[in-house]
Image: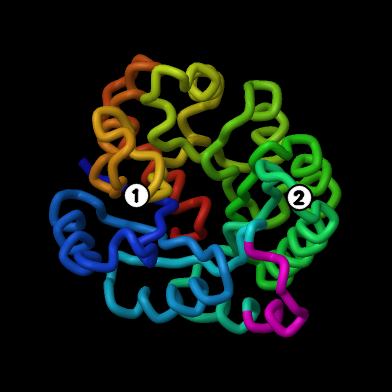
Amino acid sequence: MRIFDTHAHYDDRAFTEDMDELLRDMHEKGVERLVNIGCSMDSSKKIAEMVKEYDFLYGTVGVHPDDVDNLTEQDMQMLIDLSKQDKILAIGEIGLDYHYDGIDKDNQKRWFVEQLNVAKQEKLPVVIHSRDAAKDTLDIMKAEHTGTTGGVIHCFSYGVEMAREYLNMGYYIGVGGVVTFKNGRKLKEVVEYTPLDRIVLETDAPYLAPVPFRGKRNCSIYLQYVAEEIAAIKNVPVEQVYEMTFENAEKMYHLH
């Protein structure tokens, strides 16, 4: 078992007590590479320091749509500076999230585009968050990025039609614990449709733990349950899923 977790949040409060012990233990058990994802200016700065502590840990920098309200142009310059550091692999997670009432959609779109521009300038892939914002996300990606530096649609939550659009533009599909849920039918269909060489594994830890740990704190070692589900859907050996998704992640994050 050789796991590459392309998306986790080990700087989250859920790991305050045991992060170091957990990371080292998981690495010994087969989590060979792990990318900690930025979702605010604070977390991006923290991650740029965290990656120096562990050989197997990498990071991204970026601001999640829920956190864009107070962003400034100076913050964009800070993201550029952070992104130049060793082991910072991508800009993300960035995108649109219309799930909650009363959000400023225009402001989310503005900072989404600004951060896509940072990625293009620095020639880095992107980690895209899109929730209840299918059309606007796709429209912006087509207009502003269209696979220029590649990347992943994280925690993919739309149907096969939308997956086809992103695959045609050259993006990877991020698959995590939801594929093991009974109500994860839509994602199972997307996994069935998507070629194995375009899927990457991700936890979104501490969130979205797979069955049989649903509702508990997620961690990268649980990706074995995601890999097993993908193998069953694709009717291939689970080792093939581990190897292919590992190679995919290396390509996506330009680690070759």
Q: Which residue is mark 1?
A: 4
Along the horizontal axis of the image, is 18 left or right of 120? left
Q: Residue furthest front?
A: 102
- Mark carried by residue 256: none
- Is 153 colored magenta in this rendering? no
* Quadrant hosting residue 173: top right
Point out residue 146 in the picture as x, y percentages from the top left corner.
Answer: 76, 47
Dots 1, 2 in contact, CB < 8 A = no
Residue 39 at x, y percent in the picture: 55, 63
At horizontal 69% and vertical 65% (from top left) the residue drawn is: 68
Q: Nearer the viewer, residue 108 or 127?
A: 108
Is residue 74 part of the magenta span, yes or no?
yes
* Stretch of the chain drawn in magenta: 67-78
Instruction: Tell me residue 155's x, y (percent).
Output: 52, 40
Helix, strand or loop at label 2? It is: loop
- Residue at the location (58% across, 54% down)? 127
- The residue at 29%/28% (across/down) is 211
- At 38% from the left and 34% from the top, the residue drawn is 177
Q: Which colour scheme appears in the figure?
A: rainbow
- Badge 2 amino acid: Gly
For residue 226, which quarter of the picture?
A: top left
Kindly identify the amino acid type of the residue bearing the numbered disc 1. Answer: Phe
